[in-house]
Image: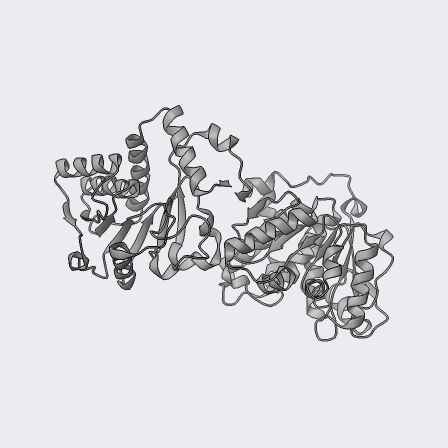
Amino acid sequence: MKIFTSKQIAQIDAYSIANEPIASIDLMERAATQLFFWIEKRYSEEQNFIIFVGSGNNGGDGLALARLLSEAKYQVEVYLVNVSQNLSVDCQMNLDRLKIQNLVSIFDISNSNDFPIIFDDSVVVDALLGSGLSRILDGLIKELVLYINASKAEVIAIDIPSGLFGEDNSLNNLNHCIHADHTLSFQFPKLSFLFPENIDCVGNWHVLPIGLHSRIINEMESPYQLVDENFIKNRLKKRGRFSHKGNYGHGLLISGSYGKMGAAILASKAALRSGIGLLSTHIPRLGYDIMQTAVPESMVSIDRSDIIFTEYPNLEDFDAIGIGPGIDTKHNSVRALDELIEECDKPLVLDADALNIIGQNQALKERLPKGSILTPHIKEFERLLGKSYGAFDRNTKQRDFSKKKAVVMVLKGAFTAITDEKGRCYFNPTGNPGMATAGSGDVLTGIILSLLSQGYSSSDAALIGVYVHGLAGDLAAEELGQEALIAGDIVEYLSKAWKKLRD
């Protein structure tokens, strides 16, 4: 699914109205009908709804929804905040329709004394302001938003929480935005929904199709996409009946140090559970017995050092290399990574301590091999590219870095962002908070290394790897719960995740 800016969505709306063709008031009715269907599935007719509407088209959506709810015997009250004293054409038309219907009490709000009592068991619908907003809320609207947020009622935002910008909220005051439990967005999610700092405003978001014109959606360019299952399935390679282990690559994993051999074990198991033909795990000497016992399917390459990474084997035998989980950042490890980057002409995935070393050495960052995959979490990202002014700024830096260096970057977290060599950004929908646990990133490194070794492109290895990693975590959480989830569970559920994708 493409993700468009607020300006682009306005253009798509206008194109749909002109070329379907459909009158704007009828498109609004279509949107309100989808809102009604969503509510009807979740709330009984006894539920009381308080709908706050503004003077623009977002308010028009709320007024049309009020009419549909009241026709279905829901208890509805409407509160109109008309700061400008002028309603949009479609908003006015829906207000007239609601008055003619004469089933809903309509109240004007001109100051804070007009705010209604919001009971805890009410459902508040936010139809105050849409996605075209470009300034921080103030005045009466801000007072009303704060009043709604202070209530204990459930809040549903139409299209976007009032006060929230569609893209960059770095200069916004999020405390002055509606804090919704559910946001019902038309046709597409807004980009700002995918950034962690906005979660308190957005709550759980849902996309409602309203039949915008497919031609303009297909033709309009956007650097942002939300990945789905079919997108991933279409990138999977078929395994031939007469294939053998040599057909599925030989990967080299450089991982582990004294006290951190678990990272090597987790990454190795994940690689082997993701289709790789052969795996060699390079570890410090003292980890030999551990690895041979814990992961007998992996061959073991031994470092001259007992406790850290200081060297690597001949790279000619390998199709791809993964390095970083648990290797530490000692001087000899820095030197060895420097030499590896200088020599490496194979697909490369860098994680954890490898990223920390690069973050401390500008020269290494400048010499990253093209097509490398970097998998930082936010703190590692900051060590690489510095502090950001917010999630949108961080995403811009990520896209620019990937394009400038011709690398793929995986910024881990909810809706993990994967940027490719062309500066495109893909958001991943799988995964859950239970995966915020030690070793989860090591598992991802192993999966991506496995896919690189099998001949997947860097971007496809990252996209598929992140998706299946999150899917395995979701399947594990369904049975084990989020609190009990550990990284080893993600490995154990990889088989179910791969099977689900193949089925």
> Measured from the top left, where is residue 260 in percent x and y?
70, 72
> In the picture, residue 256 is in which quadrant?
bottom right
Out of 85 and 301, give the one closest to the viewer. Answer: 85
The C terminus is located in which quarter?
Answer: top right
**Is 333 on the left-hand or right-hand side of 238?**
right
Identify the residue at horizontal 77%, vertical 67% (top origin).
334
**Is 174 on the left-hand or right-hand side of 382?**
left
Identify the residue at horizontal 23%, vertical 59% (top origin).
121
Q: Is residue 474 visible?
A: yes
> Measured from the top left, where is residue 277 in percent x and y?
77, 50
> Measured from the top left, where is residue 477 in percent x and y?
51, 60
Out of 18 and 69, give the one closest to the viewer. Answer: 18
Q: Is residue 203 visible?
A: no
Q: How many marks?
A: 0
> In the picture, residue 55 is in which quadrant?
top left
Out of 33 and 88, give the one closest to the viewer. Answer: 88
Colour logic: one colour
> Measured from the top left, where is residue 381 in percent x and y?
61, 60
Out of 89 and 188, give the one closest to the viewer. Answer: 89
